[in-house]
Amino acid sequence: MKEYPYWWDTVPELARPATPPASFAGLPARVDVAIVGAGYTGLAAARQCARAGASVVVLEREHVGWGASSRNGGQVLTGMKVDPAVLVSRFGETGARRLFDLSLDAIDALERVIADEAIACDYQRTGHLQAAAKPSHFQAFRLEQALLARVFDHRVELVSREGQHAELGTDAYHGLLVDERSGALNPAKYAAGLASAARRAGATIAEHTAVDRLSRVVSTTGTGRWTVATSSGEGKVEIDAGDVLIATNGYTNGAAPALRRRFVPIGSYIIATEPLAAADAATLLPRGRMAFDSKNFLYYWRLTADRRLLFGGRAEFARPTPDTTRRAASILREGLARVFPQVASAGIAYGWGGNVAFTRDQMPRAGRLGEAYYAGGYCGHGIAMATCLGTLIARRMAGETIDHPLVDDRFAAIPLYDGRPWFLPLVGAYYRVRDWLE
């Protein structure tokens, strides 16, 4: 089993066997904007800033898209992590409708970027399905369908257990909710294409260049600038920047301690089979949709262009390490066999993990914390929203007034939390009990 994302083998520049040390040659000494992190958020922001005429450098500790941006399942989903009913209870019908509509707008914006930049990332509007893990969950789908129609003017279809084989080749679930609006892409190809677009706009992207320290310097006239201390295989260098955007999401480290107290990194893991026979693959997802189930400790799955089954979930809440990845791969293989016994004997070719960044209320955020800008906390719904919020925060950095409920400087730290998620075993136990009881 290869212990890295399947997607990397579909993008030649990510599949290189060795990682060369970064060179500081050509790294600008002074820029308008320094962006930390070359995932979707940072790359979308770099493209926007550079198109607006700013000088931009993106600093990435590993390679473009190394984090969640090339490790996710490639599911471009409608809505937020928070269920529609919870959105209504928190924000009222008007506020909930606006937030849900913004998730659809983010998908539209993603599609425009892909089209405008001619990014070959296998994007398709596949739709998604959610599978009811218990009969009671299918009854909850009926309530959700009615709420989506009444409050959100959003149509979804229900498929009973008796008819679900037209959509899903398993008897492990009790009916489906189908949303035609969602999509799919190859996440690593999209990250690489977005990086190319940022470079064409004029941004500099420095891979294998870690940001060790961010220091704000205010002159006697009250003008503030940043000193960005970086390091690579060649040593250390400092960059002078007018503004800083921290776009590290679930990989935020001690260089941004305040933001680290607001994002909780949770491990998510995926396995990928060897290519399946065409007839076998066709039985799993006859219409090629993205899929996930209704548990708190959910599974999610899809087919790839070469007929591999990608099967993922939060099999371990811990951050990915070689040991946790192997344990998670074993757990996921058992889950795959229960859901799809007809392919239980398929070889597992890849197994990997990555960090998903959660916020306290499971809503994404963008804004300014102190004097640094940030965006993140996508809670597993980040492909379209990261592209959207990265672009929006770049527009705000350029001086534009942004009217968006997720772009807001009010972002409280999590009490008793310093960036080390000591409470995750307790959270995991809580959700396991809920899955058993509900």
Image (tube, rainbow, N blue to C red):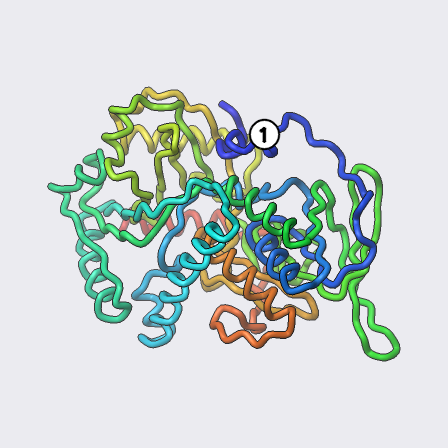
The foreground one among 202 and 212 is 202
Identify whether 110 is placed above or below 165.
below
Residue type, numbered disc 1: Ala
Q: Is residue 260 left or right of residue 430?
A: right
Q: Which residue corresponds to the image point at 25% horizontal and 45% vertical from the top-left?
A: 131
Q: Is residue 103 left or right of residue 7?
A: left
The percent coordinates of residue 394 (x first, y second) are 61, 64
Q: Is residue 314 visible?
A: no
Q: Residue at x 79, y 48 (%)?
A: 27
Q: Which residue is mark 1?
A: 15
In the picture provided, is 228 more to the left or to the right than 153?
Answer: right
Spot occupied by residue 22 in the image (x, y as percentages of width and height): 76, 39
Residue 218 at x, y percent in the picture: 82, 72
Looking at the image, can residue 375 be seen?
Answer: yes
Residue at 38% from the left image edge and 35% from the top image edge: 311
In this view, 394 is above or below 421: below
Structural crowding at the residue carrying mark 1, measured as other residues with C-alpha within 10 Å and reported as few (<14), some (14–19) or many (≥20): some
Q: How many marks?
A: 1
Q: Is residue 324 left or right of residue 205?
A: left
Q: Secondary structure at mark 1?
A: loop
Between 136 and 198, the residue placed more toward the observer is: 198
Residue ranking furthest to the right? 220
The image shows residue 205 at horizontal and vertical percentages of 69, 47
Q: Quadrant of residue 216?
A: bottom right
Pick the front one: 328 or 431: 328
Q: Measuring 36% from the left and 59% from the top, which residue is drawn there?
A: 79
Task: Using the rendered view, name the quadrant where residue 29 is placed.
Answer: bottom right
Residue that protrudes farthest toward the left in the picture: 162
Q: Residue furthest bottom?
A: 221
